[in-house]
Image (tube, rainbow, N blue to C red):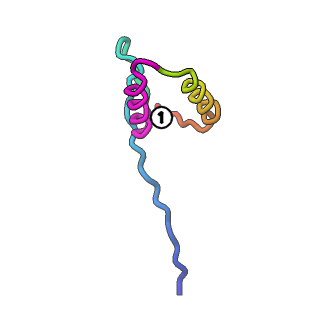
């Protein structure tokens, strides 16, 4: 009798272009979920943003920058 073996099948990650600027046009390639997060950040911080939020984002970047994948390749 064979043991039950689970095989993990990788999930395909959708990559999208995100406009950093429209004039001049500057885009970067990011994952779909990241694109959604940036859209929400732009929507909810349209008028004001707190210094605490900026500090928290900088901390997150410092802790995660070494894990980033270059999607331009």
Decide: is 4 above or below 36.
below
Quick check: is 43 in the magenta stretch?
A: yes
Q: Nearer the viewer, residue 50 or 60?
A: 50
- The percent position of residue 60, horizontal first and vertical second, equals 60, 33
Instruction: Name the spot of residue 56 as percent of width and height, x first.
Output: 59, 29
Q: Nearer the viewer, residue 50 or 42?
A: 50
Q: Is residue 57 above or below residue 13?
A: above
Residue, disc 1: 71
**55 horizontally vs 23: left or right:** right
Report which quarter residue 17 is drawn in.
top left
> Could you say whether the residue bearing mark 1 is in a helix, strand or loop?
loop
Q: Residue 44 lies in magenta, yes or no?
A: yes
- Residue at point 56%, 21% (across, down): 51
Instruction: Out of 73 and 70, give the one closest to the viewer.
Output: 70
Q: Residue at x 55, y 80 (%)?
A: 3
Residue 61 in the image: state x and y as whole percent.
Answer: 59, 30
- Mark 1 residue crowding within 10 angstroms, few (<14) / some (14–19) / many (20+): few
Q: Which residues are magenta?
A: 29-48
Q: Is residue 44 left or right of residue 68?
A: left
Q: Residue furthest bottom?
A: 1
Q: Residue at x 36, y 12 (%)?
A: 23
| Count of all numbered marks drawn on residues in the image | 1
Which residue appears at 45% of the width and 19% of the height? 48
Residue 35 vs residue 46, the one in the foreground: 46
Per the picture, the main secondary structure of the magenta-coloured stretch is helix
- Furthest-top residue in this view: 23
* Horizontal and vertical percent position of residue 25: 37, 16
């Amino acid at each position: 009798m064979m043991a039950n073996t689970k095989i993990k099948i990788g999930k395909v990650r959708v990559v999208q272009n995100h406009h950093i600027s429209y004039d001049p046009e500057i885009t970067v390639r990011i994952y779909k979920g990241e694109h959604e997060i940036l859209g929400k950040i732009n929507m909810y911080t349209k008028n004001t943003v707190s210094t605490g939020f900026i500090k928290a984002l900088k901390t997150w970047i410092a802790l995660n920058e070494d894990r980033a994948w270059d999607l331009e390749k």
